[in-house]
Amino acid sequence: MRTKSVGKKKINIVTLGCSKNVYDSEVLMGQLQANGKEVVHEDKGDIVVINTCGFIDNAKEESINTILEYVEAKNRGEVEQVFVTGCLSERYKPDLIREIPDVDQYFGTRDLPLLLKHLGADYKHELVGERMVTTPRHYAYLKISEGCDRPCSFCAIPLMRGKNISTPIENLVIEAEKLAKKGVKELILIAQDLTYYGLDLYKKRALGDLLLRLVTVEGIEWIRLHYAFPTGFPEDVLEIIKNEPKVCNYIDIPLQHINSDLLKAMKRGTSHEKTNALLAKFRQMVPDMAIRTTLIVGFPGETEEKFQEMKEWVREQRFDRLGCFTYSHEENTTAYVLKDDVPQEVKEARVEEIMELQSQISWEKNQERIGKTYRCIFDRKEGNYFVGRTEFDSPDVDNTVLVPAENTYLSIGEFADIKITSAEEFDLYGELV
């Protein structure tokens, strides 16, 4: 067994789940650095802090397996302490303490000062916008609010993240300026619900006001919007996307379903007709906007007929980007009282049907891009290709632009004009103009 280190202890932060967790880990790491602590991200350390996800079954399973893995490492003497924070810990703390008692301490999603105290650090309120960025240096997430006030019946996020709390515009601008000075060129705005931003602070939807301030930040060239809610979408944002070159012609708007009865059961506050009207408005006001959405199949009461309605709607709407997930029956959500009546194998088959259809749509749309030139940012070199993205693509979830590295050199984190020469379902191939 390894003897305990007597010198400065290295703290390893392990991040699971979504971009909001990535952001939270970066803030934690920034606080630790400001306290003079040695901190690493997903590397070897004497102390391990696991930032967990508790959203759906697969995410919970991954979080639990990771906790068990580090507890075993602790029992072998390879690490000294294991702390757990994040959504899983917020939601299931009593169960986790009982089932995995060898963890040194569990913390919730809003326990940062307490977690820091256990790590021998003080929470520094003056560190506005200070983070240790873990994404490639040219893009970063900017979390504009925490929590959610929406009543979606399938969703456990309010149980884990609490009510919506917006970050003041002034603080977000300071954070963006600090990121720009570190070389960040692309800001990806995230929240549980972007369109709700500002209602608590300014008594109005203030996403548009925030965007107009962020576009003035020198060095920031792209601003991308993730996780907008369809009900009450602020129309001034569409004008800003259309008129401000820095705001990407892109929106991530999880629509979840299209059948009106299921949307009502999901408590989404919309209908088939209202959803189509919103999408028509998007395309009317910003004709070349890339629309990304996510859908849930297998929600209680989803008959074959209702599923086919969604499939036909996907065929009609021809979304630029689309993800599809099986419904997860989550305790303490309002949908939990409904019978989970769609068998898991049916759910999975429906996901495959939707994604096969979307794959064909994506291929057809990508064929239309051949011969056109796009301004792309390059994230990395992978094998024989430089891998980049257009403004219509977010990192990790959307299409990529591949440029052969054999006779071309492209700087990572820089922009270049690329002419598309060929295309597959989810990849574009091109050459430097």
Image: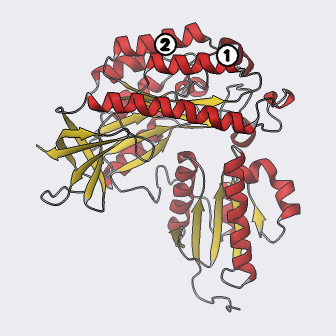
Mark 1, secondary structure of its residue: helix
Q: Position of residue 68 (x, y in %)?
A: 74, 68
Q: Position of residue 51 (x, y in %)?
A: 64, 57
Can residue 291 be spotted in the picture?
yes
Mark 2 neighbour class, 10 Å CA radius: few under 14, some 14 to 19, many 20 or more: some
For marks 1 and 2, give the CA distance.
24 Å
From the viewer's perspective, is 253 left or right of 376? right
Mark 1 or 2, closer to the camera: 1
Between 27 and 98, the residue placed more toward the observer is 98
Mark 2, secondary structure of its residue: helix
Residue at 31% over, 38% down: 222
Residue 305, disc? 1
Residue 422, disc? none
Q: Position of residue 236 (x, y in %)?
A: 41, 16
Quarter of the C terminus within the rendering:
top left
Q: Amino acid at mark 1?
A: Glu
Q: Amino acid at mark 2?
A: Leu
Which comes before the other along the chain, label 1 or label 2? Answer: 2
Residue at 56% over, 21% down: 311
- Label 2 sits on residue: 278
Residue at 65% over, 30% down: 297
Quarter of the N terminus within the rendering:
bottom right
Mark 1 neighbour class, 10 Å CA radius: few under 14, some 14 to 19, many 20 or more: few
